Image (cartoon, rainbow, N blue to C red):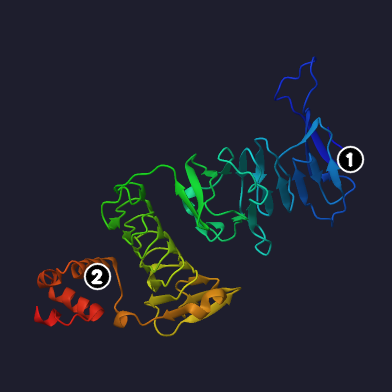
Amino acid sequence: MQTADGFLLSMNLTDKIKIATSADKIFDAIYINELDKNKNAMVNSDIEINLKHNSIKNYRKNYILPNMINPLLATHNAQNVIFHGNNDNNQFLSIKNNTYINLSHGIDTYIIGDIKVENSKNSKHIIFDFNELKTGYTGQDIITIVLKNYSGHDFFFYEDKLLYSKDHDVAEIKFINNIDDFNGKIYLIDQNSESFTIEYKNSLYSIKSTFEITTATENNDNIVYSKRNITQRKIDGLGGDDIITDMTELGNILIGGTGNDIITAKGGHNVIVDGSGNDIISLGDGNDIIISMQGNNIISAGKGNNIIVINYDNNDTKVFLNEGENKIFIQGIGNIYRNEFLGDNLIISSLDDQHNITIYDYNKYKNNLEIDTTLNNGILLNHQNVDLLISTASAFKQNNDRTVFANLADSDRDFLNQIYQYSEMSNL
């Protein structure tokens, strides 16, 4: 059934209608602006669906629907959409850019179709608002977000935004008005039916796969370390596209290895070394050292005094900063390079525009940021000499440095002497 003002009604026969009892909901209603004969072409196509009030609101008025008509939890070509759930188990369909979702009690599912943004000048947000859910929240309330066309491994958190690592012109999935130590359950299901959990503790968001192991292999691993199961302080992801999550906050050495890896450290003073693929590095609070040498990497620094070393020849690098005294050392770009601004973001490139280093929210953090291109007297770090540096630092810590240095080749000693300025090395 179609109405002159743009509503399309379809029969809802999910439950068999019995003659002896009155039917609850017979019709599902959806507003389609193209079917609205009274609509001016210049009027926007904003839609608000409220299940508590059983209503659909468009540019003209707020339609309070009779009890036998239920708003269909989907929209058609609406520019902006607002959803209000109720205490039943709801399933919202076809969510896309410029959608505002007021979370509600119950076991609710939110199906996100395409997050591509056709016009980059428009707002790029899908917002999940916890404000109406905070009061009386229980562990029985479950939120499931379904990504129909994307892999969950390609997403990472920056502050309260879940970002897609492979494209800029997509909607950011944003979570607002949450509370610390959120005891609810938030799940994400991706296009491959893999499940992930989204956690919110101490005002920090994180996403991790629900399938975990503790020993790296040459395959695609999901490795999660806690204080309970960690057996070593140097963790190498080896081969494969790995997800390495360090929850210990002990301050470890995390190495990506080959493949496209996702490396996350919840906290502590860590040393993070990328692998040879395109990696995502995300850190919690602590004074961390991040070394980025190969691949198109994304670095999300936590709060703390961080040192980020970037080899400019490693393709494109994206850096998301946080509070603290941060230093970024750029190797291989030379002393003459180009700085360009795109909004609040700083883009650093060589004069030949070979690659880009993008520092997001630069204007927000610039007063506590130092950028330098003169690290290590021009010596470029690579995975071989970084391994040597790590082994040497470990030898210092274990008071075994003289034995280690005595067995080094002359070229390795020269390199370490330039880096560490070790006074006893010439006597070995």
Element carrying mark 2: helix
Task: Determine the residue positioned at 63% across, 55% down.
Answer: 177
Q: Nearer the viewer, residue 344 or 150?
A: 344
Q: Disc 1 marks which residue?
A: 4
Q: CA distance from mark 2 to mark 1?
A: 74 Å
Discs 2/1, front: 2
Could you tell me residue 8's position as x and y percent? 81, 37
Q: Is residue 94 visible?
A: yes
| Residue 3 shown left or right of residue 166 in the figure | right
In the rendered view, would you say 174 is above or below 307? above
Residue 409, by quadrant, is: bottom left
Q: In the rendered structure, which amino acid carries the disc numbered 1?
A: Ala
Task: Determine the residue positioned at 48% across, 67% down.
Answer: 318
Quarter the C terminus occupies? bottom left
In the rendered view, would you say 48 is above or below 166? above
Q: In the rendered structure, which amino acid carries the disc numbered 2?
A: Leu
First in sequence: mark 2 vs mark 1: 1
Q: Is residue 147 visible?
A: no
Task: Determine the residue positioned at 79% across, 52% down.
Answer: 45
Quarter the N terminus occupies? top right
| Residue 299 shown left or right of residue 214 in the figure | right
Return the residue found at the far top: 20
Could you tell me residue 242's position as x and y percent? 37, 51
Q: Nearer the viewer, residue 120 or 51?
A: 51
Return the residue found at the far front: 136
Residue 389 — which label? 2
